[in-house]
């Protein structure tokens, strides 16, 4: 026997990786005394081709996340229509009109100005977008998002935007060497949500927090949506997916 061939199991299939993620979600829910059915898995498909999305869809996953509008515009028509789409990136002003018809939820509304832009375009186009407000819980200078204090002072102006439904909050903690080290950021987001609900007498039921490396911890701290890409689709190419023959985003 070739020694190099020993102990080499075949790489898990995309269906197998999806099943493993779902199992970890269920286990985390049990630890938290929660129902796994109350947690939405958003399979982050950015940079991956429609064929990979189709395989995950066929395995029972329905909600997918994209972060580039141009990539989504090309990809979504090539995926069976039962797929549901969330936008998880920073939404540029000049892409709002293209994005509104594609996505049922926008996870990363990161400023009052962006919210106002979405409101304006939605009014012109007759749309009623559902959004999450992105909070920069770690205060990173390079990250988008409301600071907690900024959100507290601007929440009334955000709530006054009549076409937007603000469904909850979202965060992207800084990378951590261990998942456990991200817990404090998830606790902070949940605490901010609870405070806003109490003080403003509003409902913000959704907490989008947790990615491939730390989603189990996020669930333990109250996440209702987890955004998982690499653990399902494998490593990203780093390049925007484009149809064959297309060489630019425009």
Image (cartoon, helix red, strand yellow):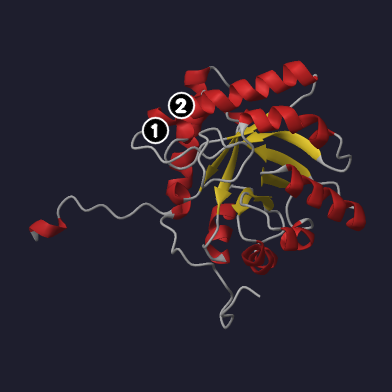
Quarter holding residue 164: top right
Q: Is residue 60 left or right of residue 105?
A: left
The residue drawn where x is 81% and y is 30% is 156
Q: Which residue is mark 1?
A: 179
Across and down, in percent, residue 67 comes to 60, 55
Check whether the beta carbons of the residues at disc 1 and disc 2 lie within 8 A of each other: yes
Report the label total.
2
Query: With respect to residue 36, does 90 lie above or below?
Result: below
The residue drawn where x is 62% and y is 29% is 148
Neighbour class for label 2 at 10 Å: few (<14), some, many (≥20)?
Answer: many
**Which quadrant does the C terminus fall into?**
bottom right
Neighbour class for label 1 at 10 Å: few (<14), some, many (≥20)?
Answer: some
Q: Which residue is mark 2?
A: 183
Across and down, in percent, residue 141 comes to 52, 43
Find numbered disc 1 in the image and state the secondary structure of the residue it sits on: helix
Looking at the rendered structure, which numbered label has been put on residue 212?
Answer: none
Q: Is residue 9 left or right of residue 70?
A: left
**Residue 139 visible in the current orientation:** yes
Q: Nearer the viewer, residue 123 or 111?
A: 111
Query: With respect to residue 128, does 200 lie above or below?
Result: above
Find numbered disc 2 in the image and state the secondary structure of the residue it sits on: helix
Q: Residue furthest bottom?
A: 245
Across and down, in percent, residue 64 comes to 61, 51
Q: Is residue 19 left or right of residue 111?
A: left
Quarter holding residue 160: top right
Q: Tell me the CA gap for discs 1 and 2.
A: 7 Å
**Residue 26 visible in the current orientation:** no
The residue drawn where x is 66% and y is 62% is 69
**Which quadrant does the N terminus fall into?**
bottom left
Across and down, in percent, residue 182 comes to 44, 31
Q: Is residue 123 left or right of residue 147?
A: right
């Amino acid at each position: 026997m070739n020694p190099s061939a020993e102990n080499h199991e075949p790489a898990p299939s995309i269906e197998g990786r999806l099943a493993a993620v779902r199992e970890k979600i269920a286990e985390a829910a049990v630890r938290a005394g929660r129902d796994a059915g109350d947690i939405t898995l958003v399979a982050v498909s950015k940079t991956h081709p429609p064929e990979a999305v189709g395989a995950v869809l066929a395995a029972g996953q329905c909600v997918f996340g994209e972060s580039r509008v141009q990539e989504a515009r090309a990809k979504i028509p090539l995926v069976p229509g039962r797929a549901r789409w969330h936008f998880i990136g920073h939404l540029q002003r000049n892409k709002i009109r293209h994005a509104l018809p594609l996505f049922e939820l926008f996870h990363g509304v990161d400023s009052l100005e962006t919210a106002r832009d979405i409101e304006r375009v939605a009014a012109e186009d007759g749309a009623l977008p559902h959004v999450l407000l992105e909070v920069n819980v770690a205060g990173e200078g390079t990250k988008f998002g409301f600071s907690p204090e900024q959100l507290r002072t601007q929440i009334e102006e955000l709530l006054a935007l009549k076409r937007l439904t603000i469904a909850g909050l979202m965060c992207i903690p800084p990378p951590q060497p261990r998942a456990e080290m991200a817990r404090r950021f998830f606790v902070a987001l949940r605490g901010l949500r609870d405070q806003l609900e109490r003080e403003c007498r509003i409902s913000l039921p959704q907490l989008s927090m947790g990615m491939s490396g730390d989603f189990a911890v996020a669930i333990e701290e109250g996440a209702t949506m987890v955004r998982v890409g690499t653990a399902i689709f494998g490593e990203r190419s780093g390049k925007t997916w484009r149809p064959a023959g297309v060489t630019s985003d425009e």
